[in-house]
Amino acid sequence: MGSNWRKKLLLSLAFGALVFIALTIYADLDELIEAFADFNWWFAPLILCCTLLNYVFRYWKWEFYTATLDMRPRRRDNLIIFFTAFTMAVTPGKFGEVLKSYLLKRVNGTPISRSAPIVVAERLTDFIGLVLLLIVGAYMFDISRTAVIAFAVFFALLTMLLAWRRGSIAVIELFGKLPIMHRFLEHARSAYESMYIMLRPRPLFISVVLSVVAWFFECFGYYIVLHVFEAPPTVLKATFIYAFSTVIGAVSMLPGGLGTTEGSLTGLAQLAGATKEVAVASTFIIRSATLWFAVVIGVIVTFAFQNRLHVNLDEIPLEDLEA
């Protein structure tokens, strides 16, 4: 793994450790250790299975998008590209998403301007799926209903705007007249044509369904954690807590939502009736089983298969990729 990537990853690991330390202090170390001791760790494989099912459905969405745009890399290569990006799940700026487009270009020559919109579509449909889960859970939790409706309206309007081809092209042409933007005009047109195809009714419906199912599995994994602790939240309340915390973490733009996601999970779990130590312990477990589990998978896949993709991550021009 390239030194620049490694530095970013280690920085995020250090930040994640600080978040865990802060939560440990908040919960009291002795009580937290006792909570972990009371947890039935035989449920850990089931929780990880829920996470893996999330990854499976998200991969199917990535596969569906690359097929919809007629990129069609070999399935094994596409699978490796998808999981290699997990290595960057906790790096600043979400570079892992850009890495998928970079690797796709190396595998079959697909221009980044054509594949990068997939990243935007994935993120948009993830948000839509999470908001739909929020709407269901919000009426069981009896809080933040206004915020949920605001999220829903925002993403509905954003999707409608992006799907309005004439208006979007007009905006691109307008910005393309600016001297500093003119050289990006063709790339912007190409990117939008890809985006427009993915936002047609059928692709949009399929990707949103895949997103809802994918994220519900992680929500259900969180419910299992709380259930093993015999904490009060029901499936719908656990779904709301996890979906809301995930959205807050993503909106914060912090790497992996570190800090904001953990704080939301802990606070909402307590509002739902969990004790302080159980709220913190459940946060530790679910974040380890989702975010950090993804990083581990990404590292393993990267070291095992980077030669198959004919990519040496030490040689990736990180500064150019960031630009």
Image (cartoon, rainbow, N blue to C red):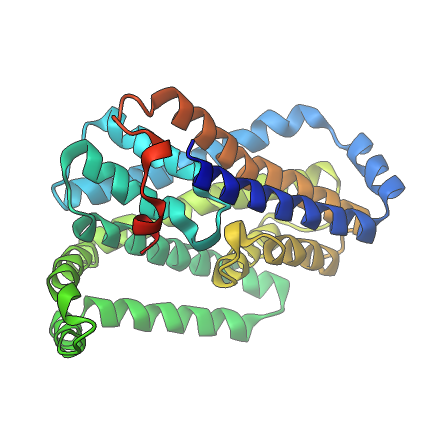
In the rendering, at what x and y percent does residue 226 appear?
68, 43
The answer to which image quadrant residue 42 occupies is top right
Would residue 118 appear left or right of 231 to someone viewing this image?
left
Would residue 11 appear left or right of 121 to someone viewing this image?
right
In the rendering, at what x and y percent does residue 74 appear?
19, 27
The one of 87 and 2 positioned closer to us in this rendering: 2
Quarter the C terminus occupies: bottom left
The one of 13 and 208 positioned closer to us in this rendering: 13
Q: In the rendered image, is residue 210 in sight?
A: no
Quarter the N terminus occupies: top left
Q: Residue at x 45, y 61 (%)?
A: 131
- The answer to whether residue 152 is above or below residue 11 is below
In the rendering, at what x and y percent does residue 310 appear?
25, 26
The answer to which image quadrant residue 129 occupies is bottom left
- The answer to whether residue 145 is above or below residue 40 is below
Q: Residue at x 51, y 41 (%)?
A: 7
Q: Residue at x 57, y 52 (%)?
A: 242
